[in-house]
Amino acid sequence: ARPTPTPSPPRPACVAMRDRDWAGALLQLQELRSARVQLSPSHYGAALKVCGAASQWRWALSLLGEARSLSLDSVANYNNAINACGRGAQYKQAEGLMEVMRQRRKLPNLITYSIAISSCARGGLYVQALRLMKEMQQGGIVPDVVAYSTAISACEKGNQYEPALRLLDDMRR
């Protein structure tokens, strides 16, 4: 028997993504499983992205756990799950996922840090945002305008204007 080819995320998942139809994306993933399609990280990524856009952090964590159990987790999938947690005001969960990434040897990248810092900004968690900025730089990742802007936003929401001004100064260098 020939193995089933691994297609890109199917058209309906893309439509579900566009419509932020997280339930439809999960259903599509289930249909692929039922059809015994060999799933890939991108299949999970499509569903995780929709869950992130819809703040469905519980479903995102469940999907990520499933992908992880099948060794189909990727940095992009962690990024989407971190985004879902941040949008769902689950900041500790988002932070915990970064630690899990490291344990699984999935190194956080600029996008990962930017998403995590954005999560902190949503909650006004300026201390965590500043720690992530420092960690990113110590890891050799150069922050971009998005990372700086979201960290500054976290400081502003926490009424911490001096650290915000220091970040603005760093960004100009």
Image (cartoon, rainbow, N blue to C red):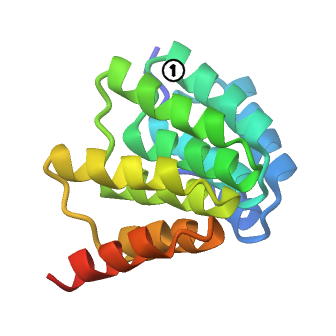
Residue at the front extreme of this rendering: 162
Query: Could you say which quadrant of the image residue 157 lies in?
Result: bottom right
Residue 3 placement (x, y as % from top left): 44, 22
Residue at the right extreme of this rendering: 23
| SS for callout 1 | helix
> Quick one: label 1, few (<14), some, or many (20+) residues within 10 Å?
some
The residue at 78%/41% (across/down) is 26
Residue 42 placement (x, y as % from top left): 49, 44
The residue at 20%/53% (across/down) is 137
Residue 113 placement (x, y as % from top left): 39, 52
User: Is 99 on the left or on the right of 24, as rendered?
Assistant: left
User: Is 95 on the left or on the right of 56, as rendered?
Assistant: left
> Is residue 31 visible to the viewer in this orientation of the structure?
no
From this view, report whether residue 44 is shown above or below residue 173. Answer: above
Residue 98 placement (x, y as % from top left): 45, 34
The residue at 66%/51% (across/down) is 86
Number of numbered discs: 1
The residue at 45%/23% (across/down) is 100
Q: Which residue is mark 1?
A: 68
> Is residue 145 visible to the viewer in this orientation of the structure?
yes
> In this view of the protein, which residue sits in the foreground, 90 or 81?
90
Amino acid type, residue under disc 1 in the picture = Arg
> In this view of the protein, which residue sits in the foreground, 52 or 30?
52
> In this view of the protein, which residue sits in the foreground, 158 or 35?
158
Quadrant of the rendering where the C terminus is positioned: bottom left
